[in-house]
Amino acid sequence: MKVLYTGSFDPITVGHLDIINRISNKFDEVVVTVFNNLEKKYWFTIEERCEMVRNATSHLHNVKVDSTEGLVVEYCEKNGINIIVRGLRAVSDYEYELSISSINKHLNKNLETIFLVASAEYSFLSSSMVKDVAEHGGAFEDLVPENVANEIHKKLGRK
């Protein structure tokens, strides 16, 4: 069975990677799709984000990385995907993700969303927090895969 795990991944964190590792053990194929959210300002281009995700997931042979713009529902329809996996860190995530899941279900009755609770050690972690800590000189390296930490240092003109 093929599933979709989607996000903007600006940048991918160890929390994202934990979810990807866990679902790759449960499903035949995991399509990690990097989407652009028009409301967000990105540090990295969609190509850079895809490459960081590819590098971080290269040890997982059933994970494919892709990118697209537009509706998740349309992407799923074009690629024969009927299940979306979303990670939840807190109740506020659930409320947001439930509304997205509901509109997706409205647009495609065959599409299901599975919510996976973040591992406790990553329940606080977000890409925004990583960028904020990095911009202010804090230690962020253990919050992202090594390849991503290197890219953040380059982006900030460090190391």
Image: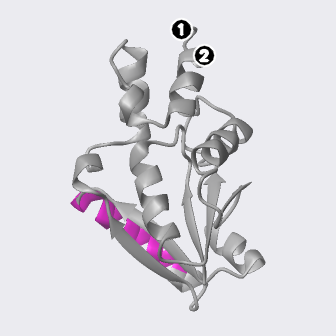
What residue lies at 64% left-to-right and 67% top-to-bottom?
Answer: 62
3D distance between C-alphas at marks 1 and 2: 6 Å
Give the quadrant of the N terminus: bottom right
Q: Identify the main secondary structure in magenta.
A: helix
What residue lies at 64% left-to-right and 50% top-to-bottom?
Answer: 58
Disc number placed over residue 82 in the picture, else none: none
Most foreground residue, 104 or 135: 135
Q: Is residue 141 above or below residue 60?
A: above
Give the extent of the magenta segment. 91-104
Is disc 1 in contact with disc 2, using a CB cutoff of under 8 Å? yes
List x then y, in percent, for residue 46. 69, 41
List x then y, in percent, for residue 131. 44, 27
Helix or strand or loop: what does disc 1 sit on? loop
List x then y, in percent, for residue 66. 72, 57
Residue type for callout 2: Lys
Q: Is residue 6 above or below residue 135?
A: below
Q: Residues within 10 Å of mark 1 (few under 14, many from 20)?
A: few
Give the quadrant of the C terminus: top right
Residue type for callout 1: Arg
Q: Which residue is mark 1?
A: 158
Helix or strand or loop: what does disc 2 sit on? helix
Most foreground residue, 98 or 87: 87
What residue lies at 48% left-to-right and 71% top-to-bottom?
Answer: 25
Q: Which residue is mark 2?
A: 154
Q: Residues within 10 Å of mark 2 (few under 14, many from 20)?
A: few
Q: Quadrant of residue 95?
A: bottom left
